[in-house]
């Protein structure tokens, strides 16, 4: 399905839009719920990734197919490795079979896990035979995807001796590690992250409790972009969000001040207001702790005709697509002057946006959603638009509610 977008007016005012729970929080809690059955979860993400994870956890089939869901692949690899007497084949889409997982598999093998590569060394699909993991110390690079580290953290309290994880060299995506840590604390699990070490105590049981998942800040980023590209006075209310969020992407609050967007926190919601004109100076941001919002920010800058230098983006090379190259390709079609490296993006100011351009999405939900706000400036067509269901099923319906037809 392709979607052609246009906007009749450049002012946005709407009633409250409810965004489903954070995919990152939901997927962590679902793994923990499998280890501790007395946990009840509310406002679970409605994303494809979370649906894939739930299906894999609830199915008795010997094969679990998680499609494009990278988080599910990493978390399930660790989880299935601890399930004694159970053998699972864990597979996904063609793209997933070209996303490396060797660093996590090596760490799990160091703990005693039985994991075999079925096709290509270092990549899914995997054959995992669950067993009791008795070792309690492991080392892993700190500059890899934080999902590898979180996968180990999530199984740690269920291990007989707990787990000590040593992070080698520079540590990236710290907010996602801290998110996992805070969720463990919320359940009453003793865990600490000091210097290069994460230590998690063995925890056979936790108390019965209900956990409410905060809405997804990555999904909120597209509304930040829309308000930034709108006329002064435009606003939108989003729920359910917390000022003391666990999610690294909540840095949107500060970053979008550069674009004239103010965030007002109310009870369980935020209101975004285009309070002033955007700053015309170059936006310089290190996004190593929030790489998932890089696409949105780059498109916002292009739509406003301002320059940006975004760094800390090395993990974008191994996402659903090579997001840096995808951004370079699609923004260039729109008229941007842009260069990328293996870890950064550099955009020059643009005075013009080419209209009626078809935006390829590369099987990447964030490509579709990041470019949609440009419809406030020019008519634009998003190819394979249904890809948004990976993280945000009601995205196009919510865009219509804002007046983007």
Image (cartoon, rainbow, N blue to C red):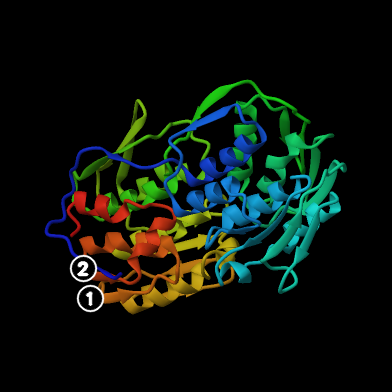
Residue at 79 percent across and 54 percent down: it is: 107
Instruction: Examine the rendering and report whether any part of residue 155 can be seen.
Output: yes
Residue at 53 percent across and 62 percent down: it is: 67
Numbered disc 1: secondary structure: loop
Q: Position of residue 137 (x, y in %)?
A: 85, 43
Residue at 52 percent across and 51 percent down: it is: 290
Closest to the observer, 364 or 91: 91
Quick one: quadrant of the N terminus? Answer: bottom left
N-term mark: 1 or 2: 1
* Viewer-nearest of discs 1 and 2: 1
Q: Residue 322, which numbered label?
A: none
Question: Where is mark 2, residue-wise?
Answer: 378
Numbered disc 2: secondary structure: loop
Residue at 45 percent across and 43 percent down: it is: 45
In this picture, is 1 found above or below 365? below
Disc 1 packing (10 Å; few <14; some 14–19; many ≥20): some
Q: Is residue 87 left or right of residue 34?
A: right
The quarter of the displayed image where residue 337 is located: bottom left
Closest to the observer, 345 or 87: 87
Question: Where is mark 1, residue-wise?
Answer: 356
Q: Position of residue 384 (x, y in %)?
A: 35, 70
Q: Is residue 128 left or right of residue 398?
A: right
């Amino acid at each position: 399905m392709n979607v052609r977008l246009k906007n009749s007016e450049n002012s946005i005012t709407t009633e409250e839009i409810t965004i489903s729970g954070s995919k990152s929080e939901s997927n962590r809690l679902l793994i923990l719920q499998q280890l501790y059955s007395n946990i009840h979860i509310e406002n679970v993400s409605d994303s494809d990734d979370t649906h894939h994870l739930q299906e894999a956890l609830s199915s008795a089939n010997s094969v679990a197919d998680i499609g494009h869901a990278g988080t599910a692949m990493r978390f399930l690899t660790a989880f299935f490795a601890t399930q004694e007497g159970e053998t699972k084949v864990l597979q996904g889409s063609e793209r997933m079979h070209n996303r490396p997982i060797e660093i996590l598999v090596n760490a799990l093998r160091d703990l005693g896990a039985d994991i075999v590569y079925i096709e290509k060394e270092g990549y899914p699909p995997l054959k995992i035979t669950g067993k009791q993991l008795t070792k309690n110390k492991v080392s892993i690079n700190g500059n890899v995807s934080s999902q590898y580290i979180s996968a180990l953290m999530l199984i740690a309290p269920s291990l007989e001796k707990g787990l000590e994880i040593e992070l080698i060299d520079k540590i990236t995506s710290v907010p996602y590690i801290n998110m996992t840590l805070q969720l463990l604390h919320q359940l009453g699990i003793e865990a600490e992250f000091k210097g290069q070490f994460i230590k998690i105590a063995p925890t056979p049981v936790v108390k019965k409790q209900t956990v409410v998942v905060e809405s997804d800040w990555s999904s909120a980023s597209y509304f930040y972009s829309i308000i930034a590209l709108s006329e002064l006075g435009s606003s939108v209310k989003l729920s359910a969000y917390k000022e003391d969020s666990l999610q690294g992407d909540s840095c949107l609050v500060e970053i979008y001040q550069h674009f004239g967007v103010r965030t007002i926190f109310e009870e369980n919601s935020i209101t975004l207001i285009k309070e002033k004109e955007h700053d015309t100076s170059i936006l310089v941001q290190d996004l190593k702790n929030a790489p998932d919002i890089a696409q949105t920010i780059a498109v916002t800058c292009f739509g406003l005709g301002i320059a940006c230098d975004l760094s800390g983006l090395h993990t974008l090379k191994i996402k659903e697509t090579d997001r840096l190259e995808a951004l370079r390709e699609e923004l260039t079609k729109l008229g941007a002057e842009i260069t990328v490296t293996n870890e950064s993006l550099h955009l020059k100011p643009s005075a013009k946006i080419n209209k009626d351009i078809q935006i390829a999405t590369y099987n990447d939900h964030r490509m579709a959603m990041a470019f949609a706000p440009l419809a406030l400036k020019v008519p634009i067509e998003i190819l394979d638009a249904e890809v948004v269901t990976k993280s945000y099923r009601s995205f196009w319906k919510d865009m219509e509610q804002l007046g983007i037809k």
